[in-house]
Image (cartoon, coloured by chain):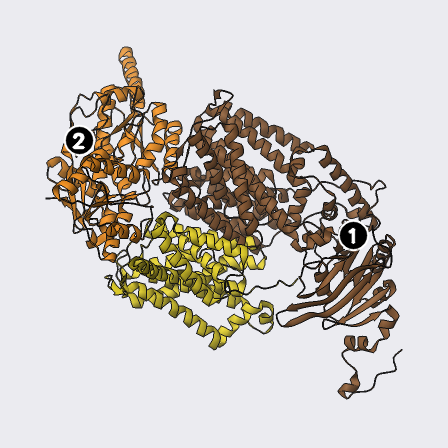
Amino acid sequence: MNKKILAASVIGLAVLVLYPVLIPNPYYVHLLETILIYAILLFGLDIVVGYTGQVSLGHAGLFGIGSYVSGVLVFKLGAPIWVALPASVAGAAFFGAVLALPALRVTGPYLAMVTLAFGTIIQILINEMTFLTEGPMGIKIAKPTLLGHKLSPVEFYYLVAVLMVLSLIVVHRILKSHLGRAFEALRDSPIASDCMGVSVYRYKVYAFVISAGLAGLAGGLYAYSEEYISPNTYNFELTIMFLLAMIMGGRKTRSGALIGALIVVMLPSLLADIELFRQIAVAAAVLGVIGAAIALAKKTSTVRGVIVPLAATIGMAAFSFKLENIVDWRLTIFGLMTLFVVYYLQEGIVGYLQGLFGKGAHHVHAVAGAGGVKPFEHAQGGAPGSVLLDAQQVLMQFGGLKALNQVNLTVQQGAVHGLIGPNGSGKSTMMNVLTGIYRPTGGQVQFAGAVISGRTPSQIALGGVARTFQNVQLFGEMTATENVLVGLHNTFRSNVADVMLQTPRCKQEEAAARARAAAILEFVGLSGMANEEARNLPYGKQRLLEIGRALGLSPRLLLLDEPAAGLTAPDIKELMAIIRKIREHGITVILIEHHMDVVMALSDTVTVLDFGQKICEGAPATVQCDPRVIDAYLGGSSEAHGGIAPAAAT
Amino acid sequence: MDILLQLVFSGIALGMIYAVIAFGYQLTFATSGTLNFGQGEALMLGALVGLSLVSNIHGGPYMHYLLMIPLVIVFGALQGVLVEWIGVRPSIKIKSEFGWIMSTIALAIIFKNVAENIWGKDDLTFPSPLDSAPFQILGANVQPMQVAVVVGALAIMLVVEIFNRYSIYGKAVVATANDRDAAGLMGINTGMVITFSYALSSATAAFAGVLVAPLTLTGATMGASLGLKAFAVAIIGGLTSGVGAIVGGLILGIAETTTGFYISTGYKEVPGLLLLLLVLAVKPSGLFGKAAIKKV
Amino acid sequence: MNFKLKLFVATAVLGFSASALAAEPIKIGVAGPFTGGSAPMGVSMRDGVKLAVAEINAKGGVLGRPLQLIERDDEAKNERGVQIAQELINKEHVVATVGYINTGVALASQRFYQDAKIPVMNNVATGSIVTKQFADQPENYIFRNSANDTIQSSMIVHEAIENRKFKKVAILADSTNYGQLGREDLEKALEKKGVKAVAVEKYNLKDVDMTPQLLKAKQAGAEAVLTYGIGPELAQIANGMEKLGWKVPMIGSWTLSMGNFIDNAGKNGNGARMPQTFIQDPNTPKRKAFIDAYVKAYNPPNGRMPSPVSAAQGYDSVYLLAAAIKQAGSTDGPKIKAALESLSEKIDGVVTTYNKPYTKDNHEAITADITVFGEVKDGHVVLAK
C-alpha cells in the first residue's frame, strides 16, 4: 500500500473509533451507523453498476431480504446475531442468484426492468406474507446479544464499523484480483471478454451475487440498527437513493461509496432545515463559479460546457431563497441532483477531485522485467500437417441473406491459412462462426476432432482458439498489462474465497500471471507502454496489444481479423515478424487480410470467399492468378459489359 | 360464473390501459432504442391536467370532457418533447445506456414531486363524462366508461398505425426504426424523428390518463404502478409488436383481476411480474416479437 | 444615591436573568402524518394543537415559559415514526410529545419515549393496546385522550346488531396495525353478541378497486359492511358498492368522518355512521369559540374542518399536558406523568370537561358515555338521530 492510502486509512480508522467518544449523542451515533451500513451495500452495488456496468433497480429488494431474514429469525426463533447475519447474507445471495441467472441473459433496459419488477415483487411478498413477516405491521427486534452481553447502542456501532471495514477489505481484494479485471473487461467489451475465455454471463452473475450478499449483510445490520422494520422502507425510492449515492460519490472507488452514503443519509436532514440548505446552496454556487473560472483559465472546458452546471448551481441557490419549506420539494432536489450527476459529474465527486488534482484511475503497476518467463507455450497436441480445424458445409443465414453458403474450410496444423475475398464476402462472418459468436444455421465445425459449433465463445476460447477483431475490441479503460492479464484469466484456478482470504495459491497465480504478461508485452514490443491505458495507445500498437492478449490463452489456433488494417509500412513489417514467430511456436494461424503482400508472403494456403461461397483455394501464387478471384475483386470482365478486352493475365 | 365474467370484463378494461402505455414504450424503443421510465408519470400528468380543466379544483370547470381531450394530448406531446430533450438526447449523444435510464427515472421523480406540490398528495375524483351506473352484458356489470376505455385505446393505436403506414412522416418514423443510420443518410432528420416519437408516446399516455382517471382515483402516485405493469406488458407482448401489446395487456389485466379475487388483492400484481420474469428468461423478445440475431 | 443605584443595578440584573430564564421555551413534539391519505387527521390535529399553544402562550405560557412546538411529519409510516421519535428525544430534547394519528406508528415509536421517561399524549390514535403497551412496567408514560377502539367497536356492533337488527355483517379492514387490530376488536365485540361476521376482508392502502372484497361480502349475504380504515379507501368501498349496484349501510370507525372520505364518496357516502367525540356543531359556547377560532386561523375550504375530531382532541391534549406541567412545577418527565395521573384542576376542554381523567392504572381520558354517533349527510357530519 502506498503512503497516501495508508495515511488516509489510519485517519479514517481513527475517526471511526473516536466518533462516539467525541459525539456521544445517540442520535448522531445512529446517523453514522446508518451511513456505514449503506456504505456496505454501496460497495456491492458499485461492483454491479460501476464495474460491470449493469443497471440494477432492485437492490432495495435485496436489502429488504437481508433485513427480513434477520428480522424473522430473531423475532420468530430468537436466533442469535451470529446466525442471523450469515443467514441474511446467504438469503440475499440466493435470491440474487435466482434473479441473476435468468435476468443477466439479457442486457441493458431489460435488466433494469427485470430488477425493477423483482424489487416490486419482493416488497409485495413481504407485505402480504403476514404469517411470516407480520406484513405492514412490521417487526420489532432489539439490539443483539454477543457472548452473553447485550450490546449497547455504542457497542453495536463498533460492530457495524468493524464489519464495514472488513467488507471494504474484502471488496477491495476481489476488485484488485483477476475477478475484478473480469468484471471490468465484460463491461468494456463483452465480445472480447467472451473470446478471451471470460464468460460474460457467468461473471455478471458472480458480480450480482456478490453484491446481493453485501446487500443482505447491510440489510441484516439495518434491522438491528433501527430495531423496527416494515415493508414500506424497501421501495423504489430507496433503490434510486442507492444509485444516486453511488454515482454521486464516484464509481469504482471505495471512498466514493462512503461519500455517497454520507450524502444520501444527510440529505433528508439537510433538506428539513431551510437555513442550512440555503447556506449550502450558496456555498455550492460559489464553488461552481470558482471551478468554472479555473476550468476556463486552464482551458479544460469551453464557455458552453460550463454554462449549464453554473446556471444550475446559481439557480438552485436563488430558488432556495424563494422557498420557505424545502421538505416538500425533497424529491425534486433528488431528481435534479441525479440529472446533474449523470451528465456533468459522471465520475462522481471522487472522480472529479481526482481529475482536478490530475490523478487518473488507479492502476497497479506492471512488473518491471519479464525475468525470462516464456510468453506462451509451444502449441501442444496433434501432429504438424494433420487437420486441426474442419468446417463442413457451413451455412449462416440472417433472415433471407445467406452470409455463408455451404462453405468448407480445412486448416492444417502448423500452417498459416489466409482467408481473403472482397468486402461483404463473409470472412468476418466465418470468423464469428468459428469462434462461436454466431451459431451456424447449418453445417458443423470441428476443432482437434471435437465438434465446437454450438458451444459458447468462452468455451471455444478455453479450448484453444483465440482471436483478434476487425474493429479493435480492447478493454479501453484498462492498461496494456491488464488487458493481457485478462487474456491470461484461464491460468487462474483460485475462486472467490481464495481471493477474499488472499491465500498463497492466489498470490502465486497473480505473480506468475504478471510475469507472463510482461513477457507477452515484450514479445509484441509493447514493454514501454505496459502501464498505459489501452485507449490511449496509438492505433498500430492497439492491434499488436490485441494479438498479445490473445496469446495469453496459449492457443493452438489463432484467428487474426485484418491485423494490418490501418497500419503504416514499418508497423506492418513488425507485424509480419511477430506472426512468423508465432508460427514458429507451432501455433496455427488463420489470417484475414486485404493487404495482398502480407497474405501472400505469410500464407501457406489461401481460401477465397465471394458472396458467402468459396470460389478458390490453393497456394498463394495460384490463387492470385485465378480469373474468378480477379473477377470477384475487380467486378467482372469488361467484355461482358461491352468494353475493351483486358490485357493478357500475367 | 357471473363473477368470473365480471372479473374478465374489468380485466379487459384494465388491460387496454396497460396496452396503450406499452404501445408508447414501443414507439420510442423502435426509433431510438430507449424507453421512458417515466411513462407512467406522463399518464399521471395528463390525467391531472385534464382534471384541472374539467373539475372545480383549480377554479374550473373550464370545458367539457371531449373538448379537454385534444388539449391534454397536446400537453402530453410537449411533455414528451421535454423528456427527450433533457433526458434522452444527451445520453444518445454520449452513447450511455445508464444515462437515459437514470435521467428518465430522475425526470419521473421530479414530475411526481411537482405534481404533488401543485395538485396535493391526496387522490382526487375525476368527474366521469358518462353515467357511472353499470349496464349488463351477459349477466355481468359493465360501466359505460370501461367500454369507452377499450374503444378509446383501440382507436388511438389504430390511428398511429394508419399514420405510420400511409403518411410520409409515418414512413420516416418506420425507416428510422428500421435503420437509423441509413435513414439519416436518406435525408431523414433522425433527431427530429426521435423527438417526434417521444412526443407521440407521451401524448398517447396522457390520453390514456384521461381515459382511465374516471375509473380510478387520480393523484400524483397513479402513474408509477401503471408504468411498471405496462413494462411487463411490453416485454410479454414484445417490444416490436402492436398486437403483442394488446394481447399482453389483456393477459395481464385478466390475470390481475382474477388473482385479486380468487387469491387476495395484495397479490394481484404478482402474476404479471412473474410472467415478465418468465418471458425474459425463456423468450426475451416477447410472445410476438421477432428474435434478432445481433450482428457483430 | 449609591445604594439606590446598586439596588437599581441589582434589580435590573435580576430582572434580565429572570427574563432570560423565563424566555427559555418548553419544547413539545408534535408527530403526525401531515401528508398522505391520513393527512386530514394529522393536519387538523396539528392545527388544533397550534391553536391551543397560541392561546396558552398569549396568557403567559406555562411556568412563565412559552410552549414551543417541534413538528415532524411521519407520513403515516411506522419507520418514519421511529426515526422521528429518536430525533425528537435525542436531538430536540422535547419535554413531551403530543400526536400519533396512526396506531401502527404509535406502537412502533412509543417505546423510545417510554425508555427515555418522556410522556406521550396520544390525541388521535385509537388502537386499544396503545396505552397498554407498557402496562406491565411500573411506570407507564403513554396517555390518550381519544376514544379507543374497544369503545368504538362495541358501539359499532351495538348499532348494527341491536339498533338496526342486522343478522349478517361483513368486516372490511385495511392491512395496517389500525385496521387489523380494529378488526380483532370488532370480532371480539361481535362474539359477545353471539354473532360471527359472514365475510372478513382485507385491503391495502392505496388500493382502488374494492370489487373482489365487496363481491365476497355480497355473495355471503351481508346486510351491512363494518369498516376499519381511512378516508380514501373507505370512499372506494362506497363507490365500489355503487359500481356493483349493491348498496348496504356502512357502519364503521370514526375515520368515516374524514374529509377525504366524504368528498371522494360523494352521495355514495350519505348515511355512513361512525362514533365521534366531537362534531363540528357550535352547540356550546366553548365549542363555538373553538370552531370560530379554528376557521378564522386556518380557513379550511367551505369552512369545514378536515377532521373535527382530530382538531378538538389535539386542542384538548395540549391543555391537559399544560395543566400537568403546571401542577408538577417542572418539565421533568416522571413528574409530569405523576401530575397527569392525579390532575387536581378541572379542565374545560372542547370534547368534554376533564375531571380527574387519569389514574395510575387508567390512561384513557375518553369514556363511552361521552362518545356519540355521527352520520354523513350531504358533505357534512351531523349528529345521528
Other-residue count near label 2 (Cα within 10 Å), few / some / many at <14 / 14–19 / ≥20:
some
Depth order, front residue of B90/B182: B182
Image x and y of residue B261, in percent:
33, 52
Q: Chain of mark 2?
A: C
Q: Amino acid at mark 1?
A: Pro
Residue shown at the point (47%, 65%) measured from the top left? B244
Q: Residue A555 got which mark?
A: 1
Q: Quadrant where the N terminus of chain B lies?
A: bottom left
Is residue A585 rendered to the left or right of residue C222?
right
Q: Amino acid at mark 2?
A: Thr
The chain painted brown is A
The chain painted yellow is B
Image x and y of residue B133, in percent:
23, 61
Image x and y of residue A573, in percent:
86, 59
Q: Which residue is mark 2?
A: C367
Tell me the SS state at disc 1.
Answer: loop
Depth order, front residue of C6/A490: A490
The answer to which image quadrant residue C174 occupies is: top left
- Say which of marks 1 and 2 sits in front: 1
Image x and y of residue A260, in percent:
53, 40
Using the rendered image of the protein, determine whether residue C23 is visible from the camera's viewpoint: yes
The answer to which image quadrant residue B64 occupies is: bottom left
Tags 1 and 2 on a common chain: no
Compared to residue A487, the image places residue A502 above or below, namely above
Using the rendered image of the protein, determine whether residue C277 is visible from the camera's viewpoint: no
Compared to residue A351, the image places residue A151 above or below, namely above
The answer to which image quadrant residue C93 occupies is: top left
Q: Residue A182 got which mark?
A: none
Identify the colour of chain C in the image: orange
- Contact, CB < 8 Å: mark 1 with mark 2? no
Q: Quadrant where the C terminus of chain B lies?
A: bottom right
Depth order, front residue of C215/A569: C215
